[in-house]
Amino acid sequence: GANINSALLAVTRKANATWVIPSEDEWYKSAYHKNDGVTSNYWDYPTRSNTAPGQDMADASGNNANYYTAPYANPIDSGKYTTIAGEFQNSASPYGTFDQGGNVWEWNEAVLSGVYRGLRGVSFDTYGNNLASSYRYYNNPTGGNNALGFRVVSEVPEPTSLGLLSLGGLALLRRKRRA
């Protein structure tokens, strides 16, 4: 009980990690940011839209996701609840990621309350109004659930880090030339 929960809260991203679970900010930006440069422009939904997504897999115009409706209607074959990544074509996030809205809740690094970790994105068994960028959720990572998942991302250095690395490389070249 308590030892497992303490261990889960102690998990932190290692320096120079290559693959990680995204922070909440990283997850949020990849789902909602308009990808129009360094701005504070965000969409309301992770399908590049300010209008709530539909559930039509045949809709070529996009803005669709896999979420719960009442009475429940599966957007795919009866008895199946999740879709293959990218099944809702033309419904990618501004950064080209699929299913950040719908399918399964996705873990992020945020510790939101006690032992509870952050979740974003809504699952197939959650109402679509929770797809909005303002909605946050959390769960205890020690419990299992078929509506929870995670997204693994590759760590990419910030542009300022790349600039510093370039300057460092130039300084080494100059130093070698003088020697």
Image: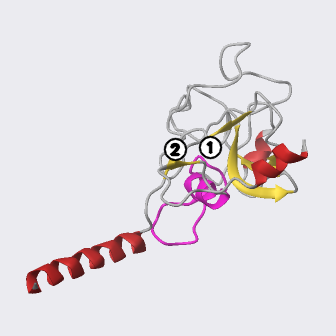
Q: Residue at x 73, y 57 (%)?
A: 110
Q: As displayed, is residue 49 above or below residue 167?
A: above
Find residue 97 and name its label: 2
Residues under numbered marks 1 and 2 in contact, where contact means CB atoms less than 8 Å apart: yes
| Residue to which mark 1 is pinned | 100
Per the image, label 2 sits on a secondary structure element best described as loop
Per the image, label 1 sits on a secondary structure element best described as loop
Q: As displayed, is residue 102 above or below residue 38?
A: above
Quadrant of res 82: top right
Residue nearest the observer in this picture, 51 or 144: 144
Question: Counting other residues with Cα less than 10 Å from the Cα at mark 2, is it few (<14), some (14-19), or many (20 or more)?
Answer: some
Q: Residue at x 67, y 31 (%)?
A: 55
Q: Which residues are magenta?
A: 24-48
- CA distance for labels 1 and 2: 7 Å
Examine the residues drawn in magenta and state their main secondary structure: loop
Picture quarter with the N terminus: top right
